[in-house]
Amino acid sequence: MNIDSPKRPGLFSGNFGYLLVVGLISIPLFIMLQVFVNRLSLPEDEVATTGFTIATIVSVFIGRYIGGILSFRMNKYPKRLLILLSMIALALTFWIFFYTEFPLRDRPTMSILLFALPLCVISAIAGLIAKVVRAVTRKQLSEAKTSAAQSESELQLLQSQISPHFLFNTLNNMYGLSITQQEKIPSLLLKLSDLLRYSVYDARKSYVPVKDELAYINNYIDFEKMRIGERLALTTDFEDFGAVDAKIAPMLLIVFIENAFKHSKNSANERIFVHISLKTWGNRLLFTCVNSYSSGLDKVVDEHGGLGLDNAKKRLDLLYEKDYHLAIEDSDNTYKVMLQLKMK
């Protein structure tokens, strides 16, 4: 398979429309240069003006060509170079205005050179800067599109792992109950059906209403209360999101809540506790989850135990970038998750 390498731009690259625009620009350029030429008192002023006009346009193309070469491997703006070139162009512009006021009328050849050379340099600099800025901007836009496509692909992959991960953990828990507490299985299966319906259909979206996510969380909490029984001391502090028109990434908070119940269940305490809080502060969502925790025992978990937490962190990076703050604290007795994020 042949892969063509990127081609450098040609000296006069462009289509007919582009050349037409250049032709139209040359008209006001000719008129402006005519004013300066009249001040220089050059013989055959129209011929001189035509020559200056052609030289200016050619210089712009030369500057664009040089800019294309310079920007061939550039991925960001060369700020120092652009500033230096801009200062040179500005100084030469002042020189042209100054010289047209005090020209060397008795030496026409030198007069033409002192006017034409700065004019060509300014034109070349203008063409170079325009080309570099345009080329770098196009590269950055292309890279941004590629990065967005990669992020979208990674996000879809992460979201596709949510339901299997949740189902795997839940079925493991239900298997244990089927041996020791068979009477709970029918009710748990009904709750599991509601949970899976949400995770299969709504979790495909990038964002869902916070009230829908909270309803799912409440369903999951009811499921865990039925599964764990009287051993669990649970407290919740949920704000009323019924009238709040805000959205959140689906099944994002449930990962931390599921983790809390798993940590608590694995502890050696006869009584375990889980405290969950979900509130708003301005346009931010404040989530806190605290649970009992035995660091020694909880390290003995299956090899898939960290998938959900890693998944959640990657989704936070992709969907919220810098609009979130996640803090996790653990001690010998408690495990605490604090998450702040900007609601959509």
Image: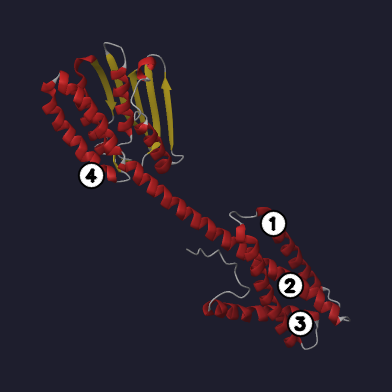
Q: Nearer the viewer, residue 304 or 251?
A: 304
Residue 180 lies, in percent from the top left, at 16, 18
Q: Residue at x 33, y 45 (%)?
A: 206
Residue 64: % across, % down: 64, 69
Query: Furthest-front residue in view?
Result: 1
Q: Nearer the viewer, mark 1 or mark 2?
A: 1
* Badge nearest the viewer, 1 or 4: 4
Give whichever of discs 4 and 2 has the lower sequence position: 2
Q: Which mark is residue 81?
A: 1
Q: Which residue in the structure is indicated by mark 4?
A: 201
| Label 1 or label 3, whichever comes before in sequence order | 3
Work out whether residue 240 can be spotted: no
Q: Is residue 63 left or right of residue 13?
A: right
Q: Quadrant of residue 42?
A: bottom right
Report crowding for label 2: few under 14, some 14 to 19, many 20 or more residues within 10 A (C-alpha).
many
**In front here: 19 or 262?**
262
- Mark 1 touches mark 2? (CB < 8 Å): no
Q: Secondary structure at mark 3?
A: helix
Which residue does the numbered mark 3 point to in the structure image? 38
For disc 2, the marked residue is 119
Of circles 1 and 3, which is in front?
A: 1
Labels 2 and 3: the sequence-earlier one: 3
